[in-house]
Image (cartoon, rainbow, N blue to C red):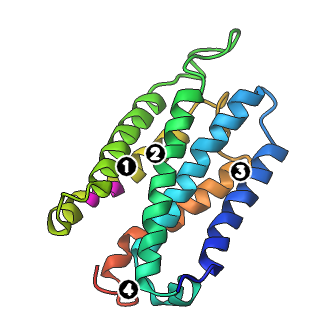
Amino acid sequence: MLQKKGIFAIVGLVLVFAVVHLAFPPEQHDPCTTGTVMLGSIAFLLMTSSIILSTRLEVFDDWFGGLDRMYQVHRVAGVFAALTALVHFFGVPKELPEGVDPVANAIFPSGPLGMLGLIFLVIGLFIALNRKIRYSRWRPTHKVMSLVYFLIFGHFMMAPGIFFERFSASGIILIIAAAIGFSSMTGCGNSATRAC
């Protein structure tokens, strides 16, 4: 039976982030930029949650109701991460506002990193949801999600300050999430995890 403690933890993390992000937006942001940056950040938090669940730590069994339920939440979090990232992509401004120094606020390499990450994320989502692909073939390709995570991290860390302030309150939440996500990626070799 699905326990809701883990789901509440993920939803709580997203809500805390959203409140902090909306309460302390960069002053140069218009509402559209604030909202679409928030959606991209939520996608990253959902990816982090999915990565943490992929470690299959036994400590989370009680939070979700067992390994099968953790897998279901892992999958749903991944799907919502991809969908939220797509909305972020289509909504976020593609050009700098007028009067902004284009050299100090260069979109390269943030833009291409985000685009590559999104492409791989959507391909990974398609493969993961395609029931015709056997698990034995799907599993090795799913490990590419680690690369996607690195690309998305690079995307927001290299983003121009006009779009994302790395050391704002919400930016620090994302950096902490990334540190936990990256350490979780090495969790498959840890004796505290089940066989990955």
Q: Measuring 30% from the left and 80% from the top, which residue is drawn there?
A: 189
Left or right, 163 with respect to 89, comes to: right
Residue 103 x %, y %: 56, 17
Proximity of marks 3 and 2: CB atoms separated by less than 8 Å:
no
Other residues around mark 1 within 10 Å, as few (<14) / some (14–19) / many (≥20)? many
Q: Earlier in the sequence, mark 4 or mark 1?
A: 1
Quote the CA–CA distance across marks 2 and 1: 6 Å
Residue placed under numbered mark 3 in the picture:
170
Quote the CA–CA distance across marks 1 and 3: 21 Å
Residue placed under numbered mark 2 in the picture:
152
Other residues around mark 4 within 10 Å, as few (<14) / some (14–19) / many (≥20)? some
Residue placed under numbered mark 1 in the picture:
148
Q: Measuring 53% from the left and 22% from the top, which residue is drawn there?
A: 106
The residues colored magenta run 142-146
Which amino acid type is marked by label 3? Ser
Per the image, label 3 sits on a secondary structure element best described as helix
Nearest the eye: 88 or 96: 88
Per the image, label 4 sits on a secondary structure element best described as loop
Which amino acid type is marked by label 4? Thr
Q: Earlier in the sequence, mark 4 or mark 2?
A: 2
Q: Earlier in the sequence, mark 4 or mark 3?
A: 3
For residue 193, which numbered disc appears in the image? 4
Left or right, 57 with respect to 105, comes to: left
Q: Is residue 56 above or below residue 165?
A: below
Other residues around mark 3 within 10 Å, as few (<14) / some (14–19) / many (≥20)? many
Q: Measuring 60% from the left and 77% from the top, which residue is drawn there?
A: 6
Nearest the eye: 166 or 90: 90
Q: Is residue 179 above or below residue 130?
A: below
Quote the CA–CA distance across marks 4 and 3: 30 Å
Which amino acid type is marked by label 2? Ile
